[in-house]
Image (spheres, helix red, strand yellow):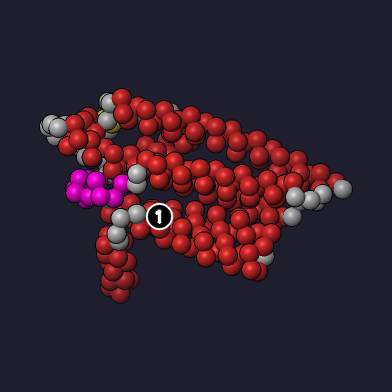
Amino acid sequence: MSDKYKYRHRFLTILRLMPRNATLYAGLGVGVVAFFCGVWVVPQYAIGIGANAFFIVFCALSWLKTPLLTADYLKKNARKEDTPALGIILIVAFVVSASIISLTLALFSGTKPDPFQVISGVTSVLTGWFTVQTLGALHYAYEYYQAPDEQGGGDSEVEGGLDFPGDEPPNGVAFMYFSFTIGTSVATSDTRLQSNTMRRRVMVHLVFSHLYNTFLLAFAVNVLMSLGGGGGG
């Protein structure tokens, strides 16, 4: 038990000491390596393999780091760790493109869908969705704790653009909850928006989530129809 605690402590220490955007770069690095390995071994699956590797590694590291994102940690590190808005747009564009390409190739590349390619494509769409929500949660967290200093006054929580219920200062889990609520229900639930800047960001997230969820449903129908048609042939 003590050894288990010791190894866990070391792992959390490594996560805490990771440089800015290390989880993102780690995911990209693993994704690129997985893609080229796929090109070499199974080229028809390379896009799905690379995309899934990136999504899974990024989400796994981000979720493991979430317990470390206390309110104090976020206040101290918000400015130096947030991903720039342009970077977020590029990553989201990559997520959508990789998911669409992977699943489109799976469904329409031949007369009979390749089951493994379909599984890879569907997985990339799902893991891509989790990636978008996770990225949104981290950006909301850092944006929230950057806001008071940028607006030049006070320490009121609403100056961060969000008003969470309860007396506890929001931590990483709170922002994960907020982001995934938007992603699943296309609503903000019990958290109130308190600034126009945050409203703009949430509006983009809401619209994107609605479109992505619609796309997810449409492709789910296509997958079932393609597999049914393939089985009937």
Q: Residue under circle 1? A: 24
- Tell me which residue sits at (49%, 56%) in the image: 54
Residue farthest to the bottom? Answer: 3
Q: Helix, strand, or loop for circle 1?
A: helix
Query: Residue 77's spot in the image, x, y percent?
Result: 23, 50
Numbered range of the magenta stretch: 70-82
Q: In the displayed structure, would residue 201 be above or below residue 36? A: above
Q: Is residue 58 visible?
A: yes
- Tell me which residue sits at (76%, 44%) in the image: 226
Taking the image as shown, residue 60 lies to the left or right of residue 212, namely left
Residue farthest to the front? Answer: 86
Residue farthest to the right? Answer: 233
Q: Out of 216 and 45, give the one closest to the viewer.
A: 45
User: Principal SS element in the magenta part?
Assistant: helix
- Tell me which residue sits at (49%, 33%) in the image: 208
Residue 120 position by quadrant: bottom right
Query: Residue 111's spot in the image, x, y percent?
Result: 82, 49
On whether residue 169 falls in the magenta region, the answer is no
Q: In the displayed structure, would residue 182 be above or below residue 90? A: above
Taking the image as shown, residue 179 lies to the left or right of residue 154, namely right
Image quadrant for the N terminus?
Answer: bottom left
Q: Amino acid at mark 1?
A: Leu
Q: Residues within 10 Å of mark 1 (few under 14, many from 20)?
A: some
Query: Residue 56's spot in the image, x, y percent?
Result: 49, 56
Q: In the displayed structure, would residue 161 be above or below residue 116? A: above
